[in-house]
Structures are given as structure tokens and as C-alpha cells.
Amino acid sequence: MSTLDFREGHPSSSRVVGLAIVLGLHLLLVWALVSGLARDVVKAVQEPLQVALIAELPKEVPPAPPPPPEVVKPPEAYVPPPVVQKAPPVVPQKTIQQVQTVQPEPQPVIVEPQPVLPRADPSHGNTQPPYPAASRRAGEEGRVILMLYVDANGRVTDGRVDQSSGYDRLDKVALMHARRTWRFLPATKDGAPVGHWMKFAVNFKLTD
């Protein structure tokens, strides 16, 4: 089995020869470039620059288009103005008519004669109703207002209690006594006897 020696500081001869060849080629190339290119550059600078001016050819101008034909407008049709008819004036109608007020003739005032009220008959005196014994014992007293109808003959034909005394016994005794026993001179109208309603008061007092 063989062994290789890789110790530093001892390069091989083939490697040294290669490096020398590469270096020589570079030096030769640099010299050639410097000597040859320098002369070419000087020649190129010394030669006069020739500039050729090429005249621009004139462009062809297209022919102008023909003018448009003149259009003659037809005459406008004559339109007669419209005939406006005036409407007749409107006469406002009076919705409110004046009304003549006629004062009515004054009517004569007819004053009806008031009837003469019934009054006591001197020939037949009207007596006080009797005091109920039960009312005396109970101490009842008061005033009764009677509404009586005196007919044309002076008799009491109807009646009612207009205002009570507050005690039913006193009210009933007063109305019953007046209808049974009282007489009057009848009321008169235009001199003729007539029936008439009239109020009468009856007082009940324990001192009576």
C-alpha cells in the first residue's frame, strides 16, 4: 500500500509551470493591447469627422377637398296668426239682493181685563178648621197653604195642599174642612162669574 506526501512548502513542478505560462500570456496580451490600440486610437482621433447632411425631401401636400355645395334653404311657409276672439265681458251676478225691510204696522195692544178674585161671602162666614185632639196632645202646630178652586157658584170643588205644615193630620183637617164648608163670592171676568184657583192660608196654634 502506497502513501502520498501532502507536506506544505513543497509544491509540485507541474503546478509551477502552469502558473508561469498563465502569467506570461497575460503580460503578452497587455503589451499587445497597449501598443496596438494606442496607435489606432490616435489615428481615429486625427481623421476628420465627415458628416453627411441628407436633405429632407418635401412631403407631398394632399389636394384641398372641394368646397361643399351651397344649400339653398326653402322659404318658410307662411302661417297666418291665429284669430283670437274676444270673449264677451262677464257681468258679475249679484248673489245678494237688497231686501227692503217693511216695518209691520203696530198691532193694537189688547189688554185683557184681569178677573176679580174670589172673596169671602159676608152671608156665609168661613170658620177655622177644628184643631185635632191628637195634634193638641202631641203639641203639633203650624201653617198650611191650600190651593183651592172656587167655581162660578162660589163653592170649593177642588183643592190640594200647596205647602205642608209639617204634620199630616193638620194638613188633612184643613183641606177637608175648606172643601166641605167654605163658600165664596166667585171671581168675575167682564162682569160674569168664572171659576178660579186661589191660595188660602190656615194657621194652627195651641193657644187657640
Image: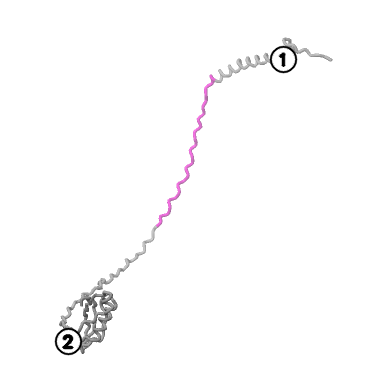
**Residue 164, position as x, y percentages in the image:** 26, 76
**Residue 20, position as x, y percentages in the image:** 70, 13
Quadrant of res 127: bottom left
**Secondary element type, mark 1:** helix
Residue 176 visible to an observer of this rendering: yes
The residue indicated by pointer 1 is 18
Quadrant of res 26: top right
Of residues 152 and 24, the one drawn nearer to the viewer in this rendering = 152
**Residue 151, position as x, y percentages in the image:** 22, 87
**Residue 114, position as x, y percentages in the image:** 17, 83
What residue do we see at 60% from left, 18% from top? Answer: 37
Left-right relation of 74 to 152 = right
What residue do we see at 38% from left, 61% from top? Answer: 74
Callout 2 amino acid: Asp
Is tag 1's residue or tag 2's residue first in the polypeptide sequence?
1
Q: Which mark is residue 78?
A: none
Rendered position, 78 above or below 2? below
Asked whether the residues under the numbered discs 1 and 2 touch, taking CB atoms below 8 Å apart as contact, a structural biologist would say: no
Q: CA gap, disc 1 to disc 2?
A: 192 Å
**Secondary element type, mark 2:** loop
Left-right relation of 59 to 14 = left
Range of residues picked out in magenta:
45-71
Screen quadrant of the C terminus: bottom left
What residue do we see at 79% from left, 14% from top? Answer: 4
The residue indicated by pointer 2 is 121
Callout 1 amino acid: Gly
Of residues 17 and 89, the one drawn nearer to the viewer in this rendering = 89
Q: Is residue 66 magenta?
A: yes
Q: Main secondary structure of the magenta part?
A: loop
Characterize the local packing of mark 1: few (<14), some (14-19) or many (20 or more) Cα atoms within 10 angstroms: few
